[in-house]
Amino acid sequence: METYTCICGNTLFFENSHCVQCQRSVGWCPGCDRITTLLDLGNHRYQCGFADCQTLLTQCHNYKVHQVCNRCIPSNEVESAQPLCDTNKSPRM
């Protein structure tokens, strides 16, 4: 099982939507194909927490509203007020 790291140093797993140590939101970044700390930019916009990525992100509607997803969408690809992730694109394992 692949693991990831929060910016606080805590280990993250694919299913995480929050870091259990620092309580920051985390999510799947399609820009770098990793679970990342979501750096809050305000107005429901985030930035990937990895310095080598820094993709601007928007949480999937199901993540933001229903808390049943942890995927994000690159902000430049958001076309509606209720953006949905492409769950057909599975992350690399």
Image (cartoon, helix red, strand yellow):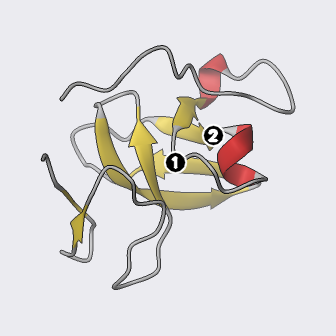
Q: Are marks 1 and 2 in contact (CB under 8 Å)?
A: no
- Residue under label 2, please give it: 58
Binning the other alpha carbons within 10 Å of mark 2 as few (below 14), some (14 to 19) or many (20 upward) gives many
Give the x, y percent position of residue 69: 58, 46
Q: Residue furthest right?
A: 81
Who's the residue at 40% across and 28% down the image?
Answer: 30
- Residue under label 1, please give it: 70
Which one is closest to the eye, mark 1 or mark 2?
Answer: 1
Binning the other alpha carbons within 10 Å of mark 1 as few (below 14), some (14 to 19) or many (20 upward) gives many
Name the amino acid, label 2: Thr
* Quadrant in the picture for residue 72: top right
Q: Tell me, yes or no, if residue 67 can be seen here.
A: yes
- Label 2 secondary element: strand
- Label 1 secondary element: loop
Vertical arrangement, residue 5 with respect to residue 88, above or below: below
Vertical arrangement, residue 22 with respect to residue 49, above or below: below
Give the x, y percent position of residue 89: 43, 15
In terms of depth relative to the viewer, which is nearer, 44 or 72? Answer: 72
Vertical arrangement, residue 22 with respect to residue 36, above or below: below
Name the amino acid, label 1: Asn
Give the x, y percent position of residue 55: 43, 35
In terms of depth relative to the viewer, which is nearer, 14 or 28? Answer: 14
- 8 horizontally vs 23: left or right: left
Who's the residue at 65% across and 38% down the image?
Answer: 60
Q: How many marks?
A: 2
Whole-angstrom CA distance, mark 1 to mark 2, is 11 Å
Who's the residue at 27% across and 49% down the image?
Answer: 50
Q: Residue furthest bottom?
A: 21
